[in-house]
Image (cartoon, rainbow, N blue to C red):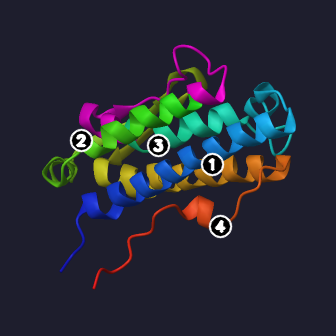
Amino acid sequence: MPISLYDALVPSWLQIAQAVRGLLDKAEGWCTEKGVAESEILNARLADDMFPLTFQIASVANHSFGAIKGARAGVFSPVPPATPPASIADLKAILDEAIAGLKQVTAEEMEGFIGRDMRFSVPAHGIEMPFTAENYLLSFAQPNFYFHATTAYDILRARGVELGKRDFLGAVRIKAD
C-alpha cells in the first residue's frame, strides 16, 4: 500500500516539533540551574556565519506547519516572527502554534495538494523556485525542517545543555501489540 503525503510528513513533523519543544524545556531548566541568561542561549550559534537558535526554532515551525500554509496558498515566503523572540517561552509559543496547526491538518487536505503548482519565494534575495506542492513539501520543506531541528539541538548541546539522542527523537511510534 502506498504511503500518503500526510503519512510521509505530518506524524514525523509532530514527533520532532514536540521533541524540539522538549529541548527548550530542558534549556530553560538548564539556564535557571546554571544561572545562564536566556539571551545567551537565544543568540547562540554553531558558527559565526550561521543563524542563532531563535532562527532555528522559527524555521522548524516555518518548514512544517508554515510549509503546509504555503501549499494551501500556492506560495511560501518565510517570514520572521512579528515580534522577535525574547525568551525561551517565546520560542515555545512559536512551536506550540505550529504543533496545534499540524494537529488540524487532514490526510484529505494533504492529498489535495498533489499536482498543484506552488513556489518558494524570497523576493528580497531574488529567489523564486517553482515546485509542485508535493515536491516542495518532500524535497525542500522536509529536509529544511530536519536541518533546523538538528541545528537547534546541536546549538543547545554545544552550550552544555544535557541532551541525548532520545531527547531529539521524542516519542517514536512503536508497534503496539
Count the marks.
4
- Secondary structure under tag 2 reads helix
Q: Nearer the viewer, mark 1 or mark 3?
A: 1
**Is 137 situated above or below 94?**
below
x 44%, y 35%: residue: 96
Q: Is label 4 in contact with label 3 (beta carbons under 8 Å)?
A: no
x 30%, y 49%: residue: 132
x 76%, y 55%: residue: 162
Q: Nearer the viewer, mark 1 or mark 2?
A: 1
User: How far apart in space, not on screen, are marks 2 and 3 (Cα)?
Assistant: 16 Å
Q: Earlier in the sequence, mark 1 or mark 2?
A: 1
Tell me, yes or no, if residue 62 can be seen here: no
x 77%, y 34%: residue: 32
In this figure, which residue is indicated by the disc labeled 1?
A: 23
**Is 58 colored magenta in this rendering?**
no
Give the image location of residue 140, x and y in percent: 47, 51
Give the image location of residue 1, x and y in percent: 18, 80
Q: Earlier in the sequence, mark 4 or mark 3?
A: 3
Is disc 2 surrounded by few (<14), some (14 to 19) or many (20+) residues within 10 Å?
Answer: few
- Secondary structure under tag 4 reads helix
In this figure, which residue is indicated by the disc labeled 4?
A: 165
Q: Amino acid at mark 4?
A: Lys
**Is 106 situated above or below 119?**
below
Q: Which residues are magenta?
A: 67-90
The C terminus lies in which quarter of the figure?
Answer: bottom left
Q: Amino acid at mark 3?
A: His
Q: Earlier in the sequence, mark 4 or mark 1?
A: 1
User: How far apart in space, not on screen, are marks 4 and 3 (Cα)?
Assistant: 22 Å
Q: Which mark is residue 86?
A: none
Is disc 1 surrounded by few (<14), some (14 to 19) or many (20+) residues within 10 Å?
Answer: many
